[in-house]
Amino acid sequence: MSLINLAFKKVKTEKRPALLTYTVAGDNTKKKSLEILKSIAKYADICEIGFPHNTPIADGGQIQSSAYRALKNGIKIKDVFSIVKDFKKSKQSKPVILMGYYNMIYQYGENNFINICKKVGVDGLIVVDLPYPENKEFAKKCKKKGISFIQLVSPTTSPSRMKKIIKDSHDMVYYISMLSTTGGKLKVSPKKILERYSKIKKLNKNKNIVIGFGITEKTIASLRKADGLVVGSALCKEISNSIKKRQNPVTNVTNIVLNLRKKIA
């Protein structure tokens, strides 16, 4: 069983959703980024790590700011792999899902990129701009190396397409709760999100389906019926605030993750 599936199995015995955190690799430095990861992993079940990108189409302002800080500090793709490798070797290690855009993979070459992911300990990949069914061949390559390719579905995904995506998905499906960039305020009520979510779950009750976009300390408790919940923009915002106030982002971000965990316990 994969580490991602094991994480979901564990939280189900604890009768709570998995907490997935998202931070940008190298924000605001390579060293600090790794420190944040190791610290929040005490309370997170799965850690999503974003590649810093200069045109992040799906990302809202907070994550864009994180990406720009990392890029300004000279973070390269090889540094992202180095952060993952060091994190996976640490005692605090948790399953890692890398999230990014296809042009980075294309530059490396698909096979080379997947081989490096395997070598450093990546458990899953989300490629925002590689939709189904165009991603089928790449997803197969990932699976051969024991890396889960995470499919994305949204409120506008048709039922027939949804069935195919979920059927072809690996360890987890990412449900984009609303049509927005990350970090936007919830435009629909948590109740409405859960209604849509339950319809998706009925298509395949055995698949782990997580909800992302717009989840904060205020909204997370009302969505705890999901298999997992992704929080990213709130963490990136706290890193920004900590830097502005000249405070330690490791402590402040960890406190938020601890609070999120308490709210879904």
Image (spheres, rainbow, N blue to C red):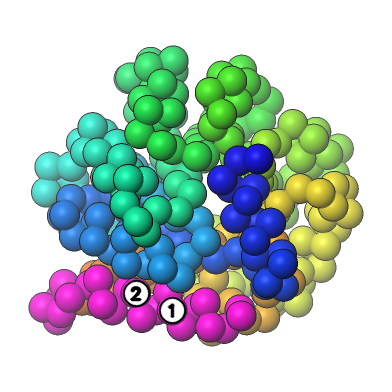
Residue type, mark 1 in image: Leu
Q: Which residue is mark 1?
A: 258
Q: Residue at x 84, y 52 (%)?
A: 205
User: Where is residue 11, by image quadrant?
Assistant: bottom right
Residue 99 visible in the shown view: no
Q: Is 217 located above or below residue 63 in the figure?
A: below
Residue 158 place in picture, x, y as percent: 80, 43
User: Where is residue 3, by image quadrant?
Assistant: top right
Mark 2 is surrounded, within 10 Å at the Cα level, by few (under 14), some (14 to 19) or many (20 or more) other residues, namely: many
In what quadrant of the picture does the N terminus appear? Answer: top right
User: Which mark identifies residue 254?
Assistant: 2
Closer-to-camera residue (49/175): 49
Relative horizontal placement of residue 219, taking residue 103 as reference (left or right): right
Q: Is 14 located above or below residue 70 in the figure?
A: below
Assess whether mark 1 and mark 2 are in contact (beta carbons under 8 angstroms).
yes
Closer-to-camera residue (260/146): 146
Q: Residue at x 85, y 47 (%)?
A: 204
- The Cα atoms of the two marked residues, 2 and 1, are separated by 6 Å
In what quadrant of the picture does the C terminus appear? Answer: bottom right
Relative horizontal placement of residue 170, taking residue 128 as reference (left or right): right
Residue type, mark 2 in image: Thr
